[in-house]
Amino acid sequence: MTVKFLDLYSQYLSIKSEIDNAIDEVIRQSAFIGGRFVSDFEAAFAEYQQVTDCVGVANGTDALEIAIESLELPLGSEIIVPANSFIASSEAVTRAGHRVVFCDCDHETYTICVKDVLNKITPATKAIVAVHLYGHPCNMDRLLELSRQHNFAIVEDCAQAHGAEYNGRKVGGIGTIGTFSFYPGKNLGAYGDGGAIVTNDAGLAKKCRMIANHGRIGKYDHRFEGRNSRLDGLQAAVLKVKLKHLDHWIAARKGVAASYRDRLAAIPGLAIPGEAEWASHVWHLFVVRTEQRDPLRDFLTESKIETGIHYPISLPSLEAYRYLARDCSAFFSHWAAPRILSLPIGEHLSTDQVERVIEVVVRFFKDGQRGRFVQ
Ligand SMILES: *Cc1c(COP(=O)(O)O)cnc(C)c1O
């Protein structure tokens, strides 16, 4: 039995006629840029994420960069970013003309560590990027409290957290502004690149829409120099179809996570991911931690079970951030990077496949520790 990490083709087959019809319709209307398909999806996604405004953009990285730009912070402001994330979270800060300040992540949820945020605040701090990593919401009440005390904005990076909730509220509209990625492998993925910005601030939404569309407010009426970063009609139509199925797919992820958590919790030497009491976790990734990471990964690979590592190198340790000359080797995220492993999760997994993953992991820790990798 093979267990894939991700299976977008099987997902397509499960909704093939809806997707094919949607794509046909966009082509028939030649509604490739702008138009009804984009505005329909924006409205549907705003409603789903419980916000007043949604602006479709070309990808999740642009969404972050444009969202940060729309805040009009003084150039060179310090923006706090968690060390455990995809590089887009920090790249966007620098690209928008600001300075990245890395902070550590929480041991249980791997999201931004509030205590360490406090250590990193200076008078130059103007924003933080709250990454709802792996689909687990950050501790928003504590972050909102700090943002009020120290007067900084909160940009929620929701690239992995479509549908996730903090105390019953969807992420994205809790802070100042929120961003999403529709990269194909995300919980809500397009058939190419796509992204969105969400907010309850109509002024910010308008600014973002202008930045993403050449600074224009009407045809050939450009109020400033913007850029070209738009969600296209085909992606919007695909996303609108997939959005209807998202809650069902999230429920499947929760089911897989519950089985893993139930059956793997008692294994000594294996740390399973936590879920805070405020969280409705959408399990984009199920990340375990062990000293035996590489042998476990090899054992799973030999057993035809695909895994991933998110992320193998913590952001401050990347070559790209050597220029910061900050020693982050004491960070938990740095220590955890060589110990974390993402198990397969998603609606593509059958009950048998989930059982198989559990069985192989259990067997590794029973026999594997003694070097007996018996199949
Ligand atoms: C995927 C991702 C992004 C970037 O999204 P793209 O659409 O690939 O540009 C940003 N932040 C996080 C946490 C991500 O996982």
Image (spheres, rainbow, N blue to C red):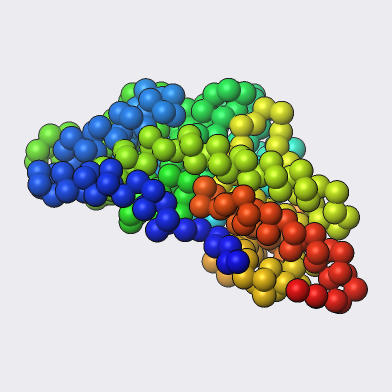
Is residue 213 something that shows in the picture? Answer: no
Residue 309 vertical position relative to residue 144 in the rendered view, above or below: below
Q: Residue at x 15, y 44 (%)?
A: 25
Residue 330 vertical position relative to residue 218 in the rendered view, above or below: below
Is residue 302 something that shows in the picture? Answer: yes
Q: Nearer the viewer, residue 248 or 64?
A: 248
Q: Nearer the viewer, residue 252 or 68?
A: 252
Residue 156 is left or right of residue 335, and the answer is: left
Q: Residue at x 24, y 49 (%)?
A: 20
Q: Position of residue 81 (x, y in %)?
A: 59, 47
Q: Quadrant of residue 124?
A: top right
Quadrant (top left/top right/bottom left/bottom right) for the N terminus:
bottom right
Q: Position of residue 261 (x, y in %)?
A: 74, 45
Residue 143 is left or right of residue 27, and the answer is: right
Quadrant (top left/top right/bottom left/bottom right) for the C terminus:
bottom right
Q: Nearer the viewer, residue 110 or 28?
A: 28
Q: Position of residue 11 (x, y in %)?
A: 42, 51
Q: Residue at x 77, y 48 (%)?
A: 263
Q: In this figure, what is the number of numbered marks?
A: 0
Q: Nearer the viewer, residue 187 or 108?
A: 187
Q: Position of residue 31 (x, y in %)?
A: 14, 44
Q: Residue at x 39, y 48 (%)?
A: 14
